[in-house]
Image (tube, rainbow, N blue to C red):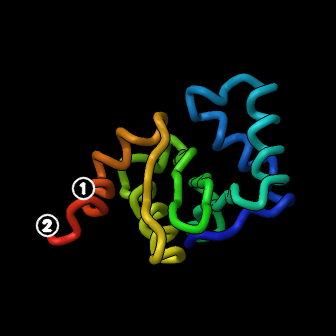
Amino acid sequence: MLIRYKKAYEKIAMGLLSFMPNVKDLKKLQQTMKQYEEDGNRQLYLWKADDDIIGLLGAYIDDDTIEIQHICVTPSHRHEGIGKCMVKALKDLHSNKQLKPNEDTVAFLEKCKFLKDEENPDE
């Protein structure tokens, strides 16, 4: 289940974000969290399964697009389709917006065929 980030989940969110290669540095991690907390267009979501938070999805959302900026799943839950479920749940929340990746998430979204679906909805 996709839930919105709350300050109470800060340590969990930071731990998950640290799995992203470009956010491993503590200073960069703190800066990224601050951006999500202060910028109204940046939204952070967590994936809750049972009572555990096992995934994180960060996006920049404007009037027309959802840019997936961060997507992370705990190592023990990878390859179970959780990342794909998170993106689909976010897309369902904002069905009128076009999904797009950044340079860090493009390979994942292409692998899951989200970009192909956006560009060729009839396929």
- Tell me the quarter of the image containing the C terminus: bottom left
The location of residue 97, given as percent across then percent down, is 48, 69
Taking depth in this image into account, of 64 and 28 the one nearest to the observer is: 64
- Vertical comparison of 120 with 115: above or below: below
| Few, some or many residues within 10 Å of mark 2 (<14, 14–19, 20+) | few
In the rendered structure, which amino acid carries the disc numbered 1?
A: Lys
The location of residue 82, given as percent across then percent down, is 44, 58
- Tell me the quarter of the image containing the N terminus: bottom right
**C-beta proximity under 8 Å, tags 2 and 1:** yes
Taking depth in this image into account, of 117 and 11 the one nearest to the observer is: 117
Give SS at disc 2.
Answer: loop
Would you identify the image quadrant in which residue 55 lies?
A: bottom right
For the residues labelled 2 and 1, the Cα–Cα distance comes to 8 Å
In the rendered structure, which amino acid carries the disc numbered 2?
A: Glu
Would you identify the image quadrant in which residue 9 lies?
A: bottom right
Residue 123's disc is 2
Task: From the viewer's perspective, tell me whether residue 15 is left or right of residue 84.
Answer: right
Give SS at disc 1.
Answer: helix
The location of residue 17, given as percent across then percent down, is 65, 40
Task: From the viewer's perspective, tell me whether residue 107 is left or right of residue 123.
Answer: right
- Vertical comparison of 80 with 33: above or below: below
Residue 116's disc is 1
Residue appearing at x 66%, y 30% in the figure: 23
Task: From the viewer's perspective, tell me whether residue 92 is left or right of residue 115.
Answer: right
List the single residue furthest toward the front: 63
Identify the mark nearer the N-term, 2 or 1: 1
| Few, some or many residues within 10 Å of mark 1 (<14, 14–19, 20+) | some
Residue appearing at x 77%, y 61% in the figure: 40
List the single residue furthest toward the left: 123
The location of residue 101, given as percent across then percent down, is 45, 47
Residue appearing at x 49%, y 62% in the figure: 86
